[in-house]
Amino acid sequence: MKRILLVLCAVLLVAGIGFSAVKPYAGEKVKLVLAVFPSLDAAYNASLPEFNKKYPNIEVEVRALGYGDHHNMLVTALAAGKGLPDVAVVEIGFVAQLGAGGGFENLLEEPYNAGQFKKFFTPYKWAQGSLGPKNLFAMPVDIAPGCVWYRKDVFDERKVNIDKIEDIEDLFAAGKKLTFDKDGDGKIDHWLLGGANYIFNMIFFSAPQRFFDKNGKPALNAPRIKLAVSWAKKFRDAGYDAKIADWSNEWYAALKEGTISYTPSGAWLGGHLKNWIAPDAKGKFRVAELPKLNKKDKTRMKMSQGGSFLAIPKKIPDVNKAAGWELIKYLCTDKQAQLIAYDKADAFPAYMPAWDAPVFDQGIDYIGGQKARKLWKEIALQIPEVYINEKDSIANSILSQALSEVLEGKKDVDTALNDAQKELESKM
């Protein structure tokens, strides 16, 4: 009998059933490393004094690297199983790639029990940090409701009413007025868009299905993706985009000078515009909802354009995991901590109870006193829920290449997407 019990225990241990090595935090003296990228370092450092009052034995060191370097560090450290932080910020652009490797704790399990907080977060954001409904590997900390940042001064000058742009066809028609030669030298110097990829992004990221169908099979040549690529190509062929890349010096200058007038992005863009990209353009920008995809649609497109999560690596000491969970709970589910992050870094709270704060009913000076936060809350509640797939990063790279080939005239839409579909299938 004793031998049978030992064998049974061994089987259960291998299966991971009924055993939890990590115990709840019990006041031990611990030093944690919280790995972030700017400007979340300023936000979290500002929140730590209150955390330290509650947990005097947990010392937190905030380490910041640039956005790309930070995520490259995580990729390397997770693969090597060493050099890992105790708690890591993961931005949505890397969440699928980093989560797919299985290197983070499942926060739905003991002793974390993150499921108790699910009702306080938007469904789409919870799904983004999950590998299916039973594995939450990254806790939502901030969100990025998608909207349009447009130059009201240019719209007024060209006699274009943003309220009349109800669908994608209306936007295309407006592109003719908002793409023009202002200095009269015979060359276009103002454009509707920075890049035609914005059109693709609006259509693609507002869909309930992305790179794979509901059964997890590649779907890069699905009708919605074909439509997204086709519309992007139509705007490119009309000359309505400046063909400049996001986060380039040309992009900064275009936003500052108003040579591009319609920029679909996240709510966070306002902080960058106000603080360093275009501080002198105060009062010239406004925000609006995305257009509808078709005239027959009853609602406008809704998309997420960023947002971050907090995760705990598996290969760190158990006591650090337990203490790290206390830090995550504080940063993600404490209203004051969420509001400090919003104030310091324009990190829109993922924790919905924080939305009750008075600031969300106030106007924003930079955009002419517009009460945009109300709009962002409404958008966040309507963004489609999509679980990530472990192959999302591979699929995204393949699809991005296909879009570039179409926009550059190297392939037609069907050929590019069918080729992309075959390439993704070969990597499954």
Image (cartoon, rainbow, N blue to C red):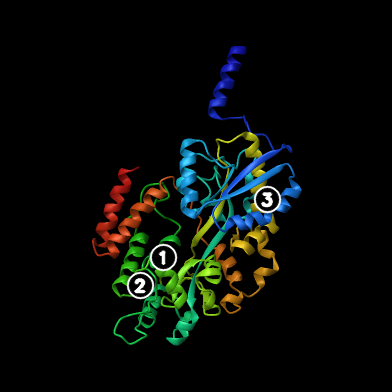
Quarter of the figure with the N terminus: top right
Residue 353 sits in quarter? bottom right
Q: Position of residue 221 (x, y in %)?
A: 32, 56
Circles 3 and 1, Cβ within 8 Å, touching? The answer is: no
Please give the count of numbered marks on the rendered protein: 3
C-alpha gap between disc 3 and disc 2: 43 Å
Q: Which residue is mark 1?
A: 248
Q: Position of residue 10 (x, y in %)?
A: 56, 21
Circles 2 and 1, Cβ within 8 Å, touching? The answer is: no
Residue 379 sits in quarter? bottom right
Q: Say which amino acid is labelled 3.
A: Tyr
Q: Earlier in the sequence, mark 2 or mark 1?
A: 2
Q: Residue at x 27, y 64 (%)?
A: 408
* Camera-nearest residue between 125 and 394: 394
Q: Which residue is mark 3?
A: 330
Q: Residue at x 58, y 52 (%)?
A: 140
Q: Secondary structure at mark 1?
A: loop
Q: Which residue is mark 2?
A: 242
Q: Residue at x 39, y 67 (%)?
A: 199
Residue 216 higher or lower than 370, as above or below: above
Q: Say which amino acid is labelled 2.
A: Ala
